[in-house]
Amino acid sequence: MCPARFKWPPEKRDETKKTVSDDTLIVKCIFHQLKVPLGNKSALGSMNDIHDVENLSQDFSRLLQSSQCSDLLLCAENEIFHVHKAILWARAPKFSNDLGLQNWNVSSGPVKVALDPPVLRLLLQYLYSGKLKTDKAEYFAGLSRIADTYGLVDLKQKLYIFPTESFLTTRIKVDRKSFMWHVNLKSPAERFYNPTFRSGCIPGSEFQLILSVCKGSGGLRNVDVCVRRLFPDKENPVFLHLMISLIGGGGRLRLPDAKKHYFLTDEEWWDGCVIKGPSESFIQEADFCEHVYLQCDLAVSAGDSSVLERSLCSSNSDVCNMTDFFCYSQDLKQLYNIFLPKFTDCILRAGKVRYPVHRAILSARSMVFSRIFTECVSDNSSNVIEITDIESAILNIILVYVYTGIVEELDYVNAIKIYSAA
């Protein structure tokens, strides 16, 4: 998980654990988003096993393929799709309203949809199953426009909020300089300060070198170098790559390894082993004291403020976690409302309680209900079906599961009754 807010600049790290190659820094991250509807953060705890998600999704997917109990025809170009008004209303209410499906009947003919058949097929597949499977990237743009037009937030998230990978790119600016600094070591001063130097293209990159001289063994002098950052831009840390050569008496002593430091603030960077005093094989002490130059070759780099972010669409975004399942099942739960039924075509009656339901959904979810509805149609029976062997409270729990895939927490007695009914 990645926090929504982060601090820049980052905390200072150990210099020995950082590597920079060719002025390029590559960071690879994997993000996972947890999405819970507002006000329902505790609802995830009531969900049943994840296999119920697959059963729910597969049953509704087969319902779309079989066209069983279809009550609506959609036409995209010359292709006809047999669908169900109730499911479209629950999963994409704005899409349903814009097409005027409320008052549609068979005699009105197919409803024309201004979409390419493959795009409409993918949309219906997503509305019925909660899954989006395609290896055709050219359909993503069309699906994205549909998601924006009809307010399908979950579809938009499947396309762009759950990428297979993301790239976060920052351009790096690099400025290189080289200068000579003459130091008279016969001076009684123990510290020498050079004129400041800075990068012309990187803000907050003004520096000053400080030379510290102390007597060593054998009458020789050890020389240490300090780099001080002046007037820093705290929002733009800089990275300094420094190489120093000590020149005197006709010879040169070059630092074997270039030094690197990451400046966050107006700090001083001391390196006690940058330069050691010269040996007799290099130059004589007298010459060393009179003629010493420091040749400084440095590179300053920093990332600019412009950041390019790119997300890749996922071509196989399934309902595979409980957060997705919750949104999917909550849409379908709207269809099960005994007080304000929508597009129902049948009534189950247990005792004195009437349950308005949808033949298509119950048939897709249960072979028993499918057989019952088939027999009722063949016998020209009424739309009211009496349920005599199941209590009304148990029937209610079964119907909640049929529509949503969720089983509420049960006590032992009700669990036995549910098991017997199933």
Image: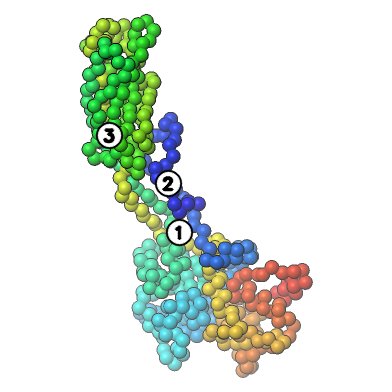
Residue 34: percent from the left, percent from the top? 52, 58
* Tag in front: 1 or 2: 2
Q: Which residue is mark 1?
A: 162
> Of the residues under marks 1 and 2, which one precedes in the sequence?
2
Q: Secondary structure at mark 2?
A: loop
Q: CA distance from mark 2 to mark 3?
A: 24 Å
The residue identified by callout 2 is: 7
Left or right: where 51 falls relative to 5? right
Q: Amino acid at mark 2?
A: Lys
Image depth: mark 1 or mark 3 in front: 3
Residue named by callout 3: 206
Which residue is rendered at x = 26% and y = 13% of the image?
Answer: 187
Say which element carries label 1: loop
Left of 366 or right of it: where is 277? left
Task: Confirm or deny contact between disc 1 and disc 3 (CB under 8 A).
Answer: no
Q: Residue at x 39, y 7 (%)?
A: 217
Q: Residue at x 70, y 74 (%)?
A: 422
Disc 1 marks which amino acid?
Phe
Q: Can you say whether 242 is above or below 123 in the image?
A: above
Q: Amino acid at mark 3?
A: Glu
Mark 1 packing: few (<14 Cα in 10 Å), some, or many (20+)? Answer: some
Q: Which of disc 3 and disc 1 is earlier in sequence?
A: 1
Q: Position of residue 352 (x, y in %)?
A: 70, 88
Q: Position of residue 286 (x, y in %)?
A: 26, 6
What residue is rendered at 46% in x and 78% in y? 93
